[in-house]
Amino acid sequence: MREQIDWKQELLDSANFNGKQEKILKHGHKSLTDSWLLGALYTCWKKMEGYREPTTSNCQSSFLEWEKRLAKKEFYVLIEDDVLYPDW
């Protein structure tokens, strides 16, 4: 079983933070902006520890490829029979 890492305590021990950052690290977030700040602090900790996010595959396509697929009719086009209208 993997050991649970207390990243917040590690981060607190590694550097000085202002009062708000320290409070969020010790007591958790109370608002949306606090959660953004906590996420930024977590990112700082990951960089400090050398963690790297896995690379994502390239899902980008060009407009030319899209036009070719459109010409081959590889896309399904909705018709009126595909849509269910409410019976009001």
Image: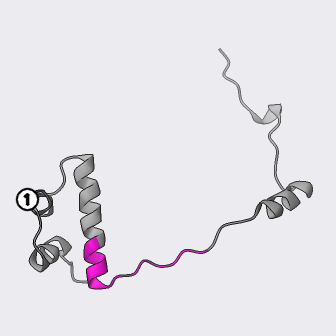
- Answer whether residue 56 is magenta in the image: yes
Determine whether, in the image, residue 55 is placed left or right of residue 46: right
Q: How many marks?
A: 1
User: Which quadrant holds the N terminus?
Assistant: bottom left
The residue furthest right is 72
Residue stretch in magenta: 44-57
- Image position, residue 35 (x, y; %): 26, 54
Say if 55 sits above or below 80 in the image.
below
Res 43 → quadrant: bottom left
Considering every residue shown, the one lying at the far top of the view is 88
The answer to whether any part of residue 1 appears in the image is: no
Q: Nearer the viewer, residue 76 or 28?
A: 28
Instruction: Identify the residue shown where x is 72% and y is 65%.
Output: 61
Q: For the C terminus, which image quadrant?
A: top right
The foreground one among 39 and 75 is 39
Amino acid type for the residue under numbered disc 1: Gly
Residue 3, relative to residue 37: is it above or below?
A: below
Name the spot of residue 3 as percent of width and height, x first. Answer: 22, 83
The picture quadrant where one finds residue 38 is: bottom left
Task: Answer with the quarter of the image where residue 40 lies.
Answer: bottom left
Q: Residue at x 21, y 78 (%)?
A: 4
Q: Is 9 covered by the magenta stretch?
A: no
State the residue at coordinates (82%, 53%). 75
Residue picked out by circle 1:
19
Q: Residue at x 14, y 63 (%)?
A: 25
